[in-house]
Amino acid sequence: MAEFLSISFTHHIRILENAKDTDERLFYIRYCHNYKPTTDDLPCIIKKQDLYNHQDKMPNNFLSTIPDYKQAYRAIRMFKDEYLLDFINVEELGMHDEDIDESVIESNIVHNVKNFIMTFGRGFTFSGSQVHYDKLGHDHWIDLLFFNRDLNRNVVFELKNGKFKVAYLAQLSTYLRILNDDDRRDHEEAPIGIILCTEADKDYVGYIMQDFRQPMGVATYRTADEMNPELLKVLPPKDELQRVLAESSKKEE
């Protein structure tokens, strides 16, 4: 009841207009209570990001690698199995080899880091891109490094422009081991890592991940041109979405 009364009448109207059934509407009422999205943002969150159908479904090994089960469940609830990174300039993709494409994606995220943080939720602080660590004479470069206050730990994002490969887990595990050993403060929890790729068999990923000891997950992402055309019809025009984001940015400054 407290959650229901804590959000505005307009929030309820937006939820009723865009959410399909009672369970989904209750989910977004709780989301509004916890995260305080604007009424302009809500249609995008419900229709475009489809948070209700993607939260808690990312393949991960958090329960077996994070000792505190409350922290493990908090991490599970923080990430979705699929994200829409609609601010990526897709015109720059597909013209180069895979490594260059990944650098294009990373560059777009860095230039739109506020949008990236909004996509992943509250509590994230951007620490850097291509963060360098030298371990025993070997160079390692982390694609994107964030700190999350709610989890009290570093979060590594590794970007892959293609299907999931087992080798990605080994690479991510190495980065997390180095961070844990060399760049973790006494009051912080162990870092976690997320691989972002364009396609992944969730059952297979979950199976392979069982033998890795570092906490990690695998999510997929889409760019704007990969969205269902029928879904695009119900969304505001891109320039309108950009206007809303710009106004939101000014309010927060």
Image (spheres, rainbow, N blue to C red):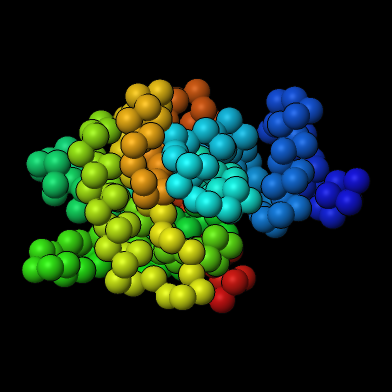
Residue at 33%, 42% in the rendered image? 212
Residue at 34%, 37% in the rendered image? 211
Q: Is residue 94 left or right of residue 227?
A: left
The answer to whether residue 84 of the structure is visible from this angle is: no
Q: Is residue 75 left or right of residue 200?
A: right
Residue 62 in the image, given as x and y percentages of width and height: 48, 44
Residue at 48%, 69% in the rendered image? 188
Q: Nearer the viewer, residue 147 or 134?
A: 134
Residue 226 in the image, given as x and y percentages of width and height: 36, 31
Which image quarter holds the C terminus? bottom right
40 is higher (above) or lower (below) than 178: above
72 is higher (above) or lower (below) than 151: above
Residue 52, picture quadrant: top right
Q: Is residue 253 left or right of residue 238?
A: right
Q: Nearer the viewer, residue 177 or 239?
A: 177
Residue 214 in the image, given as x and y percentages of width and height: 37, 49
Residue 82, picture quadrant: top left
Residue 36 in the image, given as x and y percentages of width and height: 70, 57
Residue at 27%, 33% in the rendered image? 164
128 is higher (above) or lower (below) than 227: below
